[in-house]
Image (cartoon, rainbow, N blue to C red):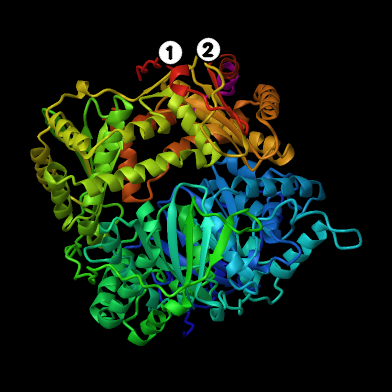
Amino acid sequence: MMLMPRPPRLRPGRRHPLPWLASLLLAGFLLAGPAQGQQPNDAALEEAVDEVVLPHVSPHDSRDYRVLRLDNGLTALLVSDPEADRAAASMNVGVGSAQDPDDLAGLAHFLEHMLFLGTEPFPEADAYQGYLQRHGGSHNAFTAPQDTNYFFDIEPEALPGALDRFSEFFLTPLFNPGQLESERNIVHSEYMSRIRDDGRRENDVLNQVLNPANPTTGFSVGSRETLADRPEGEPSLRERVIDFYQRYYDANVMHLALVAPQPLDELEAMVAERFADIADRDLERPVIEEPLVTEDGLPRYVELKSVRDSRQVSFMFPVPDPIQHYRHKPADLLAHLLGHEGEGSLFAVLREAGLADGLSAGVGRGDERHALFTVSVSLTPAGAERIDEIEATLFAAIEQIREQGLEEWRYDEQAQLAEQEFRFQQHGSTLQSAMRLSMNLARFPMEDVQYAAYRMDGFDSELIGTYLDALRPEALLRVYSGPEVEGERNSPWFDTPWREIEPEASTAQPLAGLALPVPNPFIAEDMALLDEQDERPARLLEEDGFELWHMADASFDTPKVEWRFSLQNPTASSDPRHAVLADLLAGWLEDSLNEEFYAARLAGHDAEAYAHARGITLAFSGWRDRQDRVMRRTLEQLREGDIDEASFERVRYRLQREWRNAPQAALFRQGHRTLAEALMRPHWPTQSLLEASRELTVDDLRDFRQAFLGELRLQALAIGNLDADLARREGRLVAELLDPSLPREAIPDLTPLRIDDELPTLRPVTTREESLVLRYLQGEDRSLDAQARLSVLGQVIDTPFYQRLRTEEQLGYVVSAGYSPLLDAPGLSLLVQSPDAGSEEIQTHIDAFLESFGQRLAEMDDDDLAPYRQAVHDGLLQRDTSLSERTNRLWRALSFGDTEFDRRERLAQRVLAVTADDLRETWPTLLETAIATIAYDPGDEPSDVASLTRHLEPMPEADD
């Protein structure tokens, strides 16, 4: 592409040289800090940047973009979003666990951990995290087979200081010898916390049957065993870490994305100053040549034992990684046709036969050269007995595509939908954008970092045929997982029992009824943008049993609308039986419309039903055009649809499976669930729901529907690109179909309870093999003042708790502390999950920390507190990054009775008024009263939470 002189404002689609950096104004936006030294002169900045490119972006994207290639080879994408109230950065390094040496599995992941623990200008282990926390930031990283990604977000004014610290990861990491042992323990704790995760267990088995020469098939997490000290005479573990860093961490394989409100020139200066000195070793992103599967060993059938009560079969076929053909996306059409859920689809036929309750199709395990095209089927117990039939039906569906499905109009329909989404895309948070873009920079040409996921340049039947030809019985790797499997061997890292079975010639016949999808009738045509914009929702209608709120919103430049309807009934969650029936009714509604609405979902119209304490919410999201069809059909089905036995049993089975599997969930999640069961009413334990579900029949659900719809209050909210007249018409239509009549007072509230001294330590229902302590300190009341004080305390306590109990004392990988309200009842949660330390030991460490934290508060003045206070304030007022996010926030406000929609603004003002004296006054009260403890050690008997908390009294509502 031709290089041209740079115009005053860059436009997409052209490259530009850099004679222009002399105009940069550096003063005023660079924060002083130890890593900055003298500000560079303009010539130095100009010298650091080799090339600038503009990516292809949506015509409705108001953000400014610039892609730089620094002289050292680092690529950076800058996104200036003047409306953003957060700044974010993501650095993708093109190296990962696939580069682990054979004798040090997990080294890339261990290195990722070590980079956080100090650099030459910022040697303290918590220097980076502490700075981010003081300025309302967050951070994390992940290691994948071919990538290691580091990312953070922060208040925009603090971005230069954050980049000072962040950039030094790639310049002067200390690899502090004093931190090696502690961080190895943390990595091991991370490994142990996921050892019962079924996804990782299946992957561990899969790695045993894939090609061992492909480096993505190794153990990637690391453990004390794999990261043990090296034998005497060999390079030490620290030396191996440094060697790996110097061997693979190079500016040429680094891709940085920066999203912030600052102008592009300021962002460019920040990047050029801080990242231009990263080493240029002339490296390239490693290429994996070894195939993922050795096809001469196929077909292969594998079975493995799942921890959860769930059954799944995956049909995998080796294919070229389609990322090489992203402009045409040849595998997408096949995934679309095989993964379709409409009438006559593979899933519809299997579901109708009672064999499946879920299906997905697509490409996974890609290494940029090789991949697996996978069709995964979630099975019923009957389906687990008839896998050969399912396989035969899958190949019948593939043959049908081969004979009838490779038609250009099907590809064009997908391309049209992709172009609509690209044209009106909503970017999400700055952090989400930065992470996505840094990954895309590593994989696609600079011009396509935004467009690659949507780009479909035209139907290529020959290319698609290549992928279709790979879906053959003789190239099949079939993997079944279920709780009943008895293995003949165990996988090496996640101890998964598994076995191989000999493929045999099957006489199974495919099920009848397969049909390819018809043209999609839900594709929107009217995509005109309306200009109306309201400041906040206003009540359009208020009638007996019904109120409708509306807010015209054009700020996201999309002709989409979000609707929420809360169908409220006084008995919806009055006991476990009614709560289960509400879940069943919502689940039946979605299940019964699945085939009909799958095309609508593809076209951008989503309809969701979910049960809650007050009843059932219907949520509709999508294009304004044709949304009324989806809404009307949903309401008609709810009122008049046939609740048949098969649908009832499908939904009940899914719910029961979820409740049976609850004890297998992550231990820290179970701790929080136990806390909610103890301190909120109504909130029924999963075991109570499971028991209640067993007694119900399809007639019970039919009777419940009639009773539920017979006593309703209806609350509705419409937000998006629609005017008041349209909102009024569509809202009234729903009200007329449902005929609500109950007053607001008839619907009971969800209520937080006050902890008292009689509350014992509670034990969750779990099968996990780790220990847990969740200490919960409850605020004195539900007032805005109490919420403000505890939210600031939560901001202050986060980093020191993490630093002491995780980094220094090495109690576990899952360690957190912070503000954790239950509804509007304020509280602080302090949590540690450990594979080694028991709950009593953990409690001793927490007690010691709480005592020392009081001294920290005693030494804090208002100047010290100011950045924490500001961070909480800014977090409360954080900008909505999508229409759905805004709708959900306002919907929550309405559910709390905040009809002025200003409670968060009032709370934010109270936060700014919190003083250090306020915290010193509040802290002793928290420690002396109102403490709940959830604790667990392997083998503990679970508590009867309902009986132990029955005496607790509601926390009174506040006057503000």
Q: Nearer the viewer, residue 145 or 356?
A: 356
- Under tag 2, what secondary structure? loop
Q: Nearer the viewer, residue 590 or 526?
A: 590
Q: Which residues are magenta?
A: 911-921
Rendered image quadrant of residue 618: top left
The reply to whether dot 2 and dot 1 touch (C-beta < 8 Å) is yes
Amino acid, disc 2:
Glu
Outermost right residue:
233
**Quadrant of image for the C terminus:** top left
List the residue tagged with mark 2: 758
Q: Amino acid at mark 1?
A: His
Distance (Cα) linking label 2 and label 1 = 9 Å
Identify residue for label 1.
951
Pick the front one: 66 or 624: 624
Q: Position of residue 220 (x, y in %)?
A: 64, 60
Q: Is residue 225 left or right of residue 310?
A: right
The reply, left or right, for residue 922 in relation to residue 905 is right
The relative height of residue 616 versus residue 104 in the rendered view (above or below) is above
Residue ID at (46%, 42%): 661
In this view, 329 is above or below 377: below
Up/down of 765 relative to 443, above or below:
above
Residue 270 lies, in percent from the top left, at 59, 59
Instruction: Point out the tag, 2 or 1, that comes first from the N-terminus.
Output: 2
Dot 2 surroundings within 10 Å: few (below 14), some, or many (20 or more)?
A: few
Q: Is any part of residue 91 visible from this angle?
A: no
**Is 351 colored magenta in this rendering?**
no
At 50% from the left and 35% from the top, the residue drawn is 670
Residue 509 horizontal/vertical position (percent): 31, 71
Q: Which residue is painted at 61% across and 76% down in the image?
A: 288
- Secondary element under disc 1, as helix, strand or loop, is loop
Q: Is residue 864 visible?
A: yes
